[in-house]
Structures are given as C-alpha cells and as structure tokens.
Image (cartoon, helix red, strand yellow):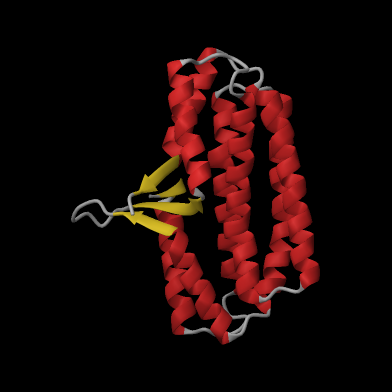
Amino acid sequence: MSYYLRCPITEEHGKTAHELISKLREKPIPKLHTSQLVDITVTGTAIQIDHYFINPMIELKISPFIQQMIVLGKKTGLSIMSPISKRSYDHMNSDQILRIADFLETFLWIEQKGVSTHHKYYMECPLSESVGKLAKQLVTLIRNNPSPKTYTDKLVQLTVQSAQAQFDFYFIKPMNILNISPFFKRMSEVGIQQGLSIISTVGHKSYDHMSKQQLLKIADYIDQFVFFHKA
C-alpha cells in the first residue's frame, strides 16, 4: 500500500494548474511560461505551509511567538525560492518543459463530484511506508491514551520526516529533472536542512506543552492529512 500527504487547493488554483500543464505541452517554448511556473510553485508551497503548519497552530492556540517563527520562516523560504525557481525555469529546454508538465500532473489530484462541473482539487506528496505507518500508529496511540509529553519525540519525527518528503518531492526532484547546477542545488539543500532544524525545534516546543484535548486534535489532523491507496 502507498501512503500520501494530501493538501486541498482551491478550484481556481487546480484549474490554473491544469491549464498550465496543457499550455506547456502545446507550446514547450523556453521562457514562455516562466512567470506562471514560478507563481504556481510559490503559491502551491504557501498553501501547503498554511495547511500543514500555520492553520493547525492557530486553531490549537499555540504560542503567538511560535506562530510568528513559522510565518517568518515561510516568508524567508518563499523569498529564496522565487528567484531560484525563476532562474531554473528560465533555462529549460523543450524536453525539460515537457518533463515538468508530466511532473506537475503526478501530484495534482482531482476528486470527481458526479456529473457536476465542480471538483475538489488536491496536491499529493508520496510518503515512505515507514512514515505512513508511523502516522497511522500515532493516531491510534494518541486516541487510546492522549497523555501529554508521551508522544513528543514521535510527533517531531513524523513532522520532520513528512516535511523532508515534501521538500524532496516538490523541490529536489524538479531540480534533478532540470539538471540544476550543483551550486544552486547545494544552496537549496542547505536551506532545506535549516528549515527542518527549525521545524524540529518548534515541534518540540509545541508538542511538549500540549494538553490532552490538543493532542486529540493533532491526531485528527494527522488522520486528515495522511491517507493511503491500496496497491
């Protein structure tokens, strides 16, 4: 069985992504679609950060200081990502453009709603079986015994490994497709490691001070975010 992280996106964003995929395939012309690719990359990342981190922190009423740390990290990361993405997309050849179109299609998922013209759109990121099983295990353990401080280490492990999976899938994989220079790839990897370090620190501070009610809510979030397809 295969595990995934699923993040809902607006119908407008989903349709924009599908239209861009079609345009890339119809006219794989260098530099023609750069601004749209940068926009969808940055916007998609912002949506996921809000969904997986900021919105749960706000709902759980986590310390405003920790919330500010995450928001600052988000702004810093996006400000770095935008120029690197532009430089990368600007130098694509026709074959790379077509491969990026294929890649975009691999993580855009649509839930059909009968004969309606309106659908639910999601971004999906694959997880390793070990991370997927850890997520489902934590949901069961917390719901059976929501004991404060008991699950801090495992929750931090799950958070960091899930974030690592997203960074690898959404950033490192496209860089490999585009044959990005080792210098820029290394810059990105260093930035990712710094981001994971911040996530780990914030995670420890947050999970260690959660009440039983907050832990149960975290279990609900994990159950909502992580799902699987049977092979």
Residue furthest toward the front? 130
Residue 58 position (above or below residue 47): above
Residue 58 position (above or below residue 190): above
Percent position of residue 97, x then y: 55, 79
In the image, 159: left or right of 8? right
Total tally of numbered discs in the picture: 0
Comparing 143 with 209, the one in front is 143
Rendering quarter of residue 22: bottom left
Percent position of residue 102, x then y: 47, 72
Residue furthest toward the left? 115
* Residue 205 makes an appearance in the image: yes
Residue 4 position (above or below residue 20): above
State the residue at coordinates (54%, 19%).
214
* Residue 221 makes an appearance in the image: no
State the residue at coordinates (18%, 56%).
115
Percent position of residue 60, x then y: 56, 23
Rendering quarter of residue 12: bottom left
In the image, 163: left or right of 202? left
Quarter of the image where the C terminus is located: bottom left
State the residue at coordinates (46%, 56%).
13
Comparing 170 with 36, the one in front is 170
Percent position of residue 143, x then y: 44, 20
State the residue at coordinates (53%, 40%).
51
